[in-house]
Amino acid sequence: MNNKLLLTHINVEGIRGFDVYRNHGGYTSVDKALKMTPEEILEEVKASGLRGRGGAGFPTGMKWSFLAKPEGVPRYLVVNADESEPGTFKDRFLMEYIPHKLIEGIIISSYCLGTNTSYIYIRGEYSWIPDILEQAIQEAKDNGFLGKNIKNTGYDLEIYVQRGAGAYVCGEETALIESLEGKRGNPRLKPPFPAVKGLYQCPTVVNNVETISSVPSIIEISGAEYAKIGVGRSTGTKLISACGNINKPGVYEIDFNLSVEEFIYSEEYCGGIPNGKKLKACIPGGSSVPIVPAKLLLKTADGETRYMNYESLSLGGFESGTMLGSGGFIVLDEDQCVVRHTMTLARFYNHESCGQCTPCREGTGWLYRILKKIEEGKGTYEDIDLLWDVQSKIEGKTICPLGDAAAWPVAAAIRHFRDEFEWHINNPECLTKNYGIANYACV
């Protein structure tokens, strides 16, 4: 793939520093943007078709256009760097190795939105990255791209880095805002939405790191040219965090015309599955999206191909499909145990529930305990039906999507791998011994 926009210069020595980044075209998009009106920048972002890269895939330009602009009230841009989704680590890669790409995107976005103060809310576990970001911010300020009267335009902007305390739920934008205000990170009821009453009850836009980092490329090549990359409503490029049973785990920049099969098996990307094992299933968008078996992802007998984009991975809906989500691509080979993996995810979501909503607070615990019972060889067929019933009572019944994130993996695992759940019940010894039965070996 030749359409690299975010990682073009990632391997250049010293690209983390301002001088090297500037010498390789950095901040030229800021120079260009500051000669445009905010309305012109917004139209370019709309024309680009850029969708939020944090998971939901909502059109960025449309989200920006919702921002209220009352007289005499400050507006804020908050960058969501609370990358806590298991299997996802592409925002960390951007911030660690090319931080000025994010700073440049914040400057352009803030100018477009009319904000004079912007925040980067970063995951608490990324303890070493705030220092990298703060150094990049200071370098940009020393070179006239931040602070008062940026490049003699009369525009002022300050960027602050705020460390989170390690709560997954703060990836939800209103919980993030609550935490940024110094309160417990509980999601807010909506409406009002952050675009009307967000940080400090002022109009606020929250976008994730990759989304904001994509803005300089849109200004550089134009929204129309950006929209030509990809396919349909999946425009531009996307960072994918690839992990699991693959030969080359890492962060890859793809366009949306790439097939799932090529991504997994091509030497340019994941390099195939170790030891010649067969693909069993994938979780293509981070741990919260539905798991999909290989037969629905690889090229089918009638020649249908699945691509790495929002529409193709939906596979016609949740009955058989999944989501691109945050791009956390987790590969499972034929020896992996779906029941055990699902139990591990349920344990995570139970631990991370803020407890505000009863279906999530109680239901995630039920999911974990039932899955643990089945995995330990003590389950019954009724437990499978009980799992299905519990997850259905969580999905769509909570303030924030954490409940859905806990329910979807369980529902998809039962939908596609119910026979594996039944095998666990009939073979309680599977935890301690590999019986060599294809696709059903517990690890």
Image: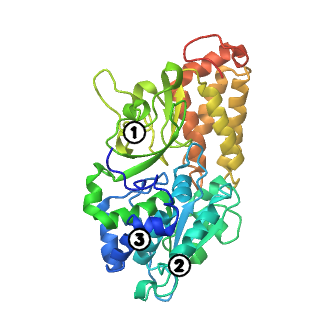
Query: What's the residue type where badge 2 is placed?
Result: Lys
Kindly identify the residue that appears in the image at 47 percent across and 57 percent down.
210
Kindly identify the residue that appears in the image at 37 percent across and 55 percent down.
5
Question: Vertical placement of 411 versus 395: above or below?
Answer: above
Pointers 2 and 3 in contact (C-beta within 8 Å): no
Q: Which residue is mark 3?
A: 27
Question: Vertical placement of 367 versus 104: above or below?
Answer: above
**How far across and how far down the image is residue 99, in percent?**
52, 62
- Per the image, label 1 sits on a secondary structure element best described as helix
Q: Nearer the viewer, residue 343 or 363?
A: 343
Question: Vertical placement of 140 versus 164: above or below?
Answer: below
- Between disc 2 and disc 1, the foreground one is 2
Q: Quadrant of the C terminus?
A: top right
Determine whether, in the image, residue 165 is placed left or right of residue 173: right
Determine whether, in the image, residue 81 is placed left or right of residue 264: right
Residue 313 is labelled as: 1
Question: Vertical placement of 242 versus 181: above or below?
Answer: above
Give the mark, 2 or 1, whose residue is nearer the N terminus. 2
- Cα–Cα span, label 2 and label 3: 12 Å
Query: What's the residue type where badge 3 is placed?
Result: Tyr
Q: Nearer the viewer, residue 289 or 138?
A: 138
- Per the image, label 3 sits on a secondary structure element best described as loop
- Between disc 3 and disc 1, the foreground one is 3
Q: Which residue is mark 2?
A: 141
- Cα–Cα span, label 2 and label 1: 42 Å
**How far across and how far down the image is residue 15, in percent?**
48, 60
* Number of other residues with Cα within 10 Å of mark 3, as a class: few under 14, some 14 to 19, many 20 or more: many
- Cα–Cα span, label 3 and label 1: 35 Å
- Per the image, label 2 sits on a secondary structure element best described as helix
**How far across and how far down the image is residue 333, in percent?**
53, 25
Q: Nearer the viewer, residue 313 or 118?
A: 118
Query: What's the residue type where badge 1 is placed?
Result: Leu
